[in-house]
Amino acid sequence: MDELRLNGDQKSDKAGRIGGHASAPHDELLFTIGVMARDFSISLRALRFYEDRGLLHPIRRGSTRLYTPADREHLELILRGKRLGFTLTEIHEIIDSRRGKMGDLESTLQPEQIVAQIHHLERQREEIDEAISALRNAQQRLAQGLAEGWPLPLENGSSSGASVFEA
């Protein structure tokens, strides 16, 4: 189905964008789920998940999901919020608090949200640094043991010779 028709006079272009006549101010450009997924480099499943969580509200035409420019803005906020380490629940609250305000995600955050998120990310970084250090120590011990002729640990206790440490 290359062409979707809405209200009889709207149709999709080859990229999956849907629009009406330029002279009609109530007509706005709509985007299919495939276009949204491609434009934002995410899966269709992720878009459906965000819809299930109440973060996106596409227009439904049967089984077809059509996204508005506002949905695109919300998706940008969702993805930006995830990059900043916020949970989807927190992102939902941030989107709800914006009430139509335009601008980037950071400009809508309260000072206490920013401080709390910085502390949260710093704790995560410390935990990640500790995990990396522990794994590097294990890697060094393994390399030293191999140099001294120790056998490789076997995967799942099998004797196949394959190791969980082999790259």
Image (tube, rainbow, N blue to C red):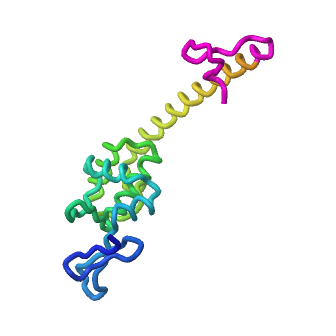
What's the magenta bit mostly, secondary-structure-wise? loop
Q: Residue at x 42, y 45 (%)?
A: 114
Task: Give percent across and percent down for residue 128.
Answer: 55, 30
- The answer to which image quadrant residue 164 occupies is top right
Magenta part of the chain: 144-167
Q: Nearer the viewer, residue 86 or 147?
A: 147
Left or right position of 122 against 90: right
- The answer to which image quadrant residue 154 occupies is top right
- The answer to which image quadrant residue 89 occupies is top left
Q: Is residue 152 above or below residue 53?
A: above
Q: Is residue 154 magenta?
A: yes
Q: Is residue 117 above or below residue 139?
A: below
Task: Give percent across and percent down for residue 167.
Answer: 66, 30
Q: Is residue 9 above or below residue 128?
A: below
Task: Give percent across and percent down for residue 52.
Answer: 26, 48
Task: State which quarter of the image contains the N terminus.
Answer: bottom left
